[in-house]
Amino acid sequence: MTHEDYMLRALTLAKRGRTSPNPMVGAVIVKDGVIVGEGYHPRAGEPHAEVFALRDAGEKAKGATMYVTLEPCCHQGRTPPCTRALTAAGISEVYVAMTDPDPKVASKGLDELRSAGLKVHVSLLESKARLINEAYIKHRTTGLPFVILKSAMSLDGKIATRTGDSKWITNERSRTYAHGIRSRVDAIIVGGNTVRADDPSLTARVGKKIYYPERVVITRTGNLSPEMKIFNSPGNSIVAAGPYANAESLRKLESRGARILPLKVTDGRLGLQGLMCELAGMGCLSVLIEGGGEVAAFALEERLVDKVVYFHAPIIIGGRDSVDSVAGIGSESISTAIKLDNIRVRRFGDDTATEGYVVYPPIPPPGGED
């Protein structure tokens, strides 16, 4: 096995964790060409990947090499510093996929290991390591969550008929995959119209497990029934309400346990930047926007969306009064349309799913030309 093989194994282990607001990390310990210890960070508050790998290796860790997907921490948090654990165990060499963007670490862990006499190598399979922790990286570097916009639509881009019927546009395989996406995010955002039309639970069902992300409803009016599923399921519900929302309705929702967050209106639209900052402050690294068309438009217009996942079913709904996947004003020209990069297309029976990272057009300079 090569250095890359050992790091690939560590990356595979890292993906097993559900660690938010911490990063996903995997570690492998090798001695004399044999893996003697493995570990990954399972969830926040539990020991880190390095500690589990050291426990697995025991005395064999002395003089061994560790492969770890993220720079070992050097600060006291809910768990002790990993750098000290590596030094105490006698690890002699460390291969690190990427440095930690968190300012509390940010190469300090690497410096500490070097000062203790360990050989340190950085950037082995860095691009793969950054991909699995893209939400953590954005959260730590911008103070905002990583935002995914997901929608299920007909070939002509409709998410519901003129009567509001939307169940089901895509097939069961597509919906199963969508639940997998839900299970890996910290919060799900929908609009008030979607909640009133569909009364969704906004949970994630993967096999026999049910996950409960933060459930966020964006509403101008606040006219939501306390009997809706999102207010009567385990987990937390958040109502992000416009300034003119019905105060009495909001009080009833708050008495049911919902958290009320005020939204500002700018140029006639609800601003989502503040909501994203609030969610990030709550420890949400990743957010999934599921609808409807107005909410999607708000998020895209504010340049908050990082990734798009669009499911297309082989049907045509048509109709000027049916519901579009993205509403709002839209682009003035094709040259200023939002584009996607690093595209991946999947098939789910007759359905297709297009995934890609959002590339926004350049922002024109204020005031135009001199």
Image (cartoon, rainbow, N blue to C red):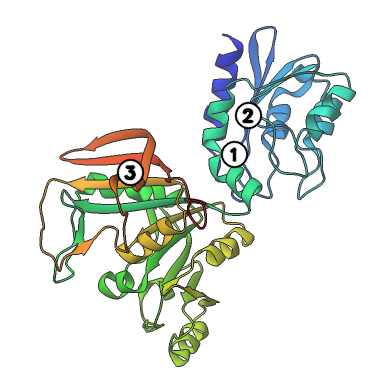
Badge 3 or badge 2: first in the primary sequence: 2
Residue 292 seen by the camera: no
Residue at x 44% of width, y 72% of height: 267
Q: Which residue is mark 2?
A: 69
Residue 163 seen by the camera: yes
- Of badges 1 and 3, the one in the foreground is 3
Separation (CA) of disc 2 from disc 1:
8 Å
Left of 160 or right of it: where is 285?
A: right
Separation (CA) of disc 3 from disc 2:
39 Å
Check disc 3 and give the amino acid type.
Ser
Separation (CA) of disc 1 from disc 3:
38 Å
> In which quarter of the view is residue 324 placed?
bottom left
Q: Is residue 160 above or below residue 102?
A: below
User: In the image shown, does 39 or 132 lie closer to the viewer?
Assistant: 132
Q: Helix or strand or loop: what does disc 3 sit on?
A: helix
Image spot of residue 21 (x, y percent): 62, 51
Q: Which residue is mark 1?
A: 24
User: In the image shown, does 32 or 14 lie closer to the viewer?
Assistant: 14
Residue at x 35% of width, y 40% of height: 355
Q: Is residue 68 above or below residue 336?
A: above
Q: How busy is the neighbourhood of tag 1: few (under 14 within 10 Å), some, or many (20 plus)?
A: many
Left of 40 or right of it: where is 326?
A: left
Q: Which residue is mark 3?
A: 335
Image spot of residue 256 (x, y percent): 48, 82
Q: Helix or strand or loop: what does disc 2 sit on?
A: loop
> In which quarter of the view is residue 190 placed?
bottom left
Image spot of residue 239 (x, y percent): 47, 75
